[in-house]
Image: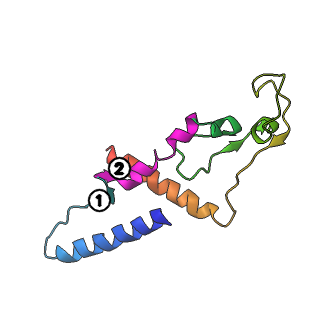
Amino acid sequence: ELVEMILLWRERLVIKYIQAHEDDSYIKPKNFAFEHEGNNYLLKMRQDLQFLTKSNLSLLIRMEDPDPFLSAMNSRRVDTRRYVDPSYSSENGPDEEAEPTETLSLPIPKELLPRVKKCEMILLEEFVNAHM
């Protein structure tokens, strides 16, 4: 919802901007950035969860960077006993060698997926516009 609210805020500002400059023959397009601590928040969102790619969660789930909505996570078959049972010890070593016991998955509910994809595109457009 945050990305959608920022977009709505921006649309309203653009309307006000156009109304305030309606006497001008040419209105220069203006991109209103929603700033947090001096940074464009939509750009910041792309990197907010980057730390997860280097966390223990990345041992269980393949993560892409940037992925602020965690929509591209691919599940892995892993030996989950080592993460949920403190008394478990694997003789096999790293997860890649252990016999997978479960597939972990964190799916986005189907009804939210179109909104998430739209918001991902908004963040991508913001990134492209900022680097032009």
User: In screen coordinates, is 21 left or right of 99?
Assistant: left
Residue projecting furthest to the front:
87
Closer to the chain start, of discs 2 and 1, is 1
**Is residue 65 visible to us here?**
no
Point out residue 39 in the picture as x, y percentages from the top left corner.
31, 51
Quadrant of the image occupied by residue 24: bottom left
What amino acid is at disc 1? Asn
Is residue 114 found inside the magenta-colored segment of the image? no
Label 2 – label 1 distance at C-alpha: 9 Å
Q: Circles 2 and 1: CB distance less than 8 Å?
A: yes
Q: Secondary structure at mark 2?
A: helix
What amino acid is at disc 2? Asn
Q: Residue at x 47, y 47 (%)?
A: 48
Q: Give the residue number, with chain letter if any, for mark 1.
A: 31
Is residue 46 found inside the magenta-colored segment of the image? yes
Q: How is the image coloured?
A: rainbow
Quadrant of the image occupied by residue 27: bottom left
Point out residue 92 in the picture as x, y percentages from the top left corner.
83, 22
**In the rendered image, which quarter contains the C terminus?**
top left
Q: Secondary structure at mark 1?
A: loop
Q: Residue at x 75, y 38 (%)?
A: 83
Point out residue 103 in the picture as x, y percentages from the top left corner.
80, 43
Q: Give the residue number, with chain letter if any, for mark 2.
A: 129
**Is residue 98 visible to us here?**
yes
Q: Residue at x 17, y 73 (%)?
A: 21
Q: Is residue 18 above or below residue 30?
A: below
Q: Compare residues 28 and 60 and report the one nearer the observer.
A: 60
Magenta region, residue range: 38-54
